[in-house]
């Protein structure tokens, strides 16, 4: 009998757990350790943040799913991992103390720590001055504060809104892109768009970068850059934009920032701001058999677990980066029964070309690894572990390099079944390969479009993936 422990219940963790349970016999145990009591469908938090969807529509209780599937559920925080002795110390929630959880295989799929403190004054908690759509609670609070802005506009006041990223190394620009367009769409529907001064601020060197080095898409036989698409959309809505920016601190109504062009601190004033924070690894200590803290050896400086990537490649510079730098199996090189999936794995380097402000502050959109990518990776890791448990191989059998798989993104630009809008973008691969393709990606399968049908697809995906993550009949037929 083997015991597989999955840390985390997001896209990567839930996908891994469901696939482990499906493919392993009942003599093997699958355990999920998570501080969450509910699964949250993150792509729909953008609609919660503009008060167009109730937060409960994006969630479901985890315990009944795990009970039905035969998965052991431990509600708590993984605090330390002892990889030589194969166990995790878990801080149980609701005052239940600690539990030692042994494993034969471990998947770290804990997702990100929302590192608001990397930017003083950022975020909705601990005296911060901005809202967030990164968690269900934060998204609900954002929707409530947004409606307060709506009331002010209805009373004739002009409101300044600032949307984007709150750190020079932040990711998930796509979520902010969706949010700014949903706000504009809703205000236009209310006849209030002229009462809003909306500004975009981002660490991207150019609009449409999204942390994947930008993209060229094919539509109707023509090629167009994501930069042109984003700029035309922003101009149509009357947005201002600031790119190549690192937000240094936030005060009440003021965001201070520097840029790639200047280290001089500038200020952008706002009445309402939603800025995505920098992501870091969830703080878990790794302790060896002698009691030494080896976290620094196993993890990158940001706390994310090192896997089978070429981490030496970062020092070779952008012009020498290759698709082969990226991990394939997500197995830790020192401990073969330890894996990472989704945001929890440390990328070898950015996908976008890095830059710095004149004073040396790094400013680069970091690689996105959420949603579809997280699910694909979690699935591959689970199947490798299944094969290793079943004696088919002593090493991972399934691969999921971001340089070898594609991803589809449906970016909401307005929620309405009759007037809604969404951009549908498919790219292959996620990490561009300029040695193989002129534009870094296969243009036969890289394309983009937008319109009402895109919104219908976005709404359909909401229901499909909640169905899948609940492990309901034939859930495995829905692609990652």
Image (cartoon, grey):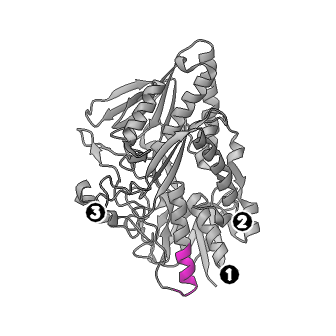
Residue density around tag 1, few if under 14, some if 14–19, many if 20 or more, within 10 Å: few
Q: CA distance from mark 3 to mark 1?
A: 40 Å
Query: Callout 1: helix, strand or loop?
Result: loop
Chief secondary structure of the magenta portion: helix
Q: Judge whether residue 212 is colored magenta.
A: no
Q: Quadrant of the N terminus?
A: bottom right
Is residue 336 shown above or below 116?
Answer: below
Q: Position of residue 91 (x, y in %)?
A: 61, 62
Q: Position of residue 178 (x, y in %)?
A: 52, 38
Name the residue tied to disc 2: 66
Q: Residue at x 26, y 34 (%)?
A: 263
Residue numbers of the magenta segment: 383-392
Name the residue tied to disc 1: 25
Q: Which mark is residue 283?
A: none
Name the residue tied to disc 3: 313
- In primary-sequence order, the first of circles 2 and 3 is 2
- In primary-sequence order, the first of circles 1 and 2 is 1
Please name whichever residue, 97 or 200, is drawn nearer the observer in this view of the structure: 200
Q: Position of residue 411 (x, y in %)?
A: 53, 43
Is residue 219 shown above or below 153?
Answer: below
Can residue 202 be seen in this snapshot?
no
Is residue 274 shown above or below 218?
Answer: above
């Amino acid at each position: 009998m083997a015991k597989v422990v999955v840390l985390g219940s997001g896209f990567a963790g839930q996908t891994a757990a469901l696939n482990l349970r499906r493919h392993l016999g009942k003599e093997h145990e699958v355990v999920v350790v998570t501080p969450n009591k509910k699964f949250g469908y993150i792509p729909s938090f953008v609609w919660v943040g503009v008060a167009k969807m109730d937060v409960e529509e994006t969630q479901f209780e985890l315990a009944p799913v795990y009970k039905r599937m035969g998965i052991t559920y431990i509600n708590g925080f993984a605090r330390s991992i002892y990889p030589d002795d194969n166990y995790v110390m878990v801080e149980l929630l609701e005052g239940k103390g600690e539990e030692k959880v042994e494993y034969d295989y471990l998947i770290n799929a804990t997702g990100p720590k929302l590192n608001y403190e990397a930017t003083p004054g950022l975020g909705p908690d601990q005296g911060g001055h901005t809202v967030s759509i990164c968690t269900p609670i934060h998204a609900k609070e954002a929707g409530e504060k947004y409606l307060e802005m709506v009331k002010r506009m209805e009373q004739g006041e002009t409101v300044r809104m600032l949307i984007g990223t709150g750190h020079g190394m932040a990711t998930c620009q796509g979520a902010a892109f969706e949010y700014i367009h949903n706000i504009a769409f809703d205000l236009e529907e209310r006849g209030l768009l002229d009462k809003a001064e909306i500004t975009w601020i981002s660490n991207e060197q150019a609009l449409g970068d999204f942390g994947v080095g930008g993209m060229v898409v094919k539509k109707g036989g023509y090629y167009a850059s994501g930069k042109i698409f984003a700029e035309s959309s922003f101009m149509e809505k009357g947005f201002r934009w600031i790119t190549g920016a690192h937000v240094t601190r936030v005060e009440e109504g003021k965001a201070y920032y520097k840029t790639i062009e200047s280290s001089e601190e500038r200020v952008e004033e706002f009445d309402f701001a939603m800025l995505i924070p920098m992501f870091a690894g969830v703080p878990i200590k790794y302790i060896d058999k002698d009691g030494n803290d080896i976290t620094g050896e196993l993890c990158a400086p940001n706390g994310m677990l090192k896997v089978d990537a070429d981490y030496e490649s970062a020092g070779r510079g952008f012009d020498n980066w290759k698709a082969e730098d990226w991990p394939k199996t997500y197995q830790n090189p020192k401990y073969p029964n330890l894996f990472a999936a989704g945001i929890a794995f440390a990328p070898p380097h950015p996908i976008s070309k890095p830059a710095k402000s004149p004073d040396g502050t790094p400013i680069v959109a970091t690689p996105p690894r959420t949603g579809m990518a997280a699910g694909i990776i979690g699935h591959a890791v689970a199947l490798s572990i299944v094969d290793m448990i079943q004696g088919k191989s002593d090493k991972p059998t399934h691969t999921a390099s971001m340089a070898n798989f594609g991803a589809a993104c449906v970016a909401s630009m307005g929620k309405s079944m009759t007037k809604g809008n969404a951009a549908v973008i498919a790219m292959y691969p996620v990490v561009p390969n300029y040695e193989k393709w002129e534009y870094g990606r296969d243009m036969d399968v890289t394309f983009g479009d937008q319109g009402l049908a895109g919104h219908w697809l976005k709404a359909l995906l909401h229901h499909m993936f909640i169905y899948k993550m609940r492990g309901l009949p034939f859930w495995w037929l829905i692609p990652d």
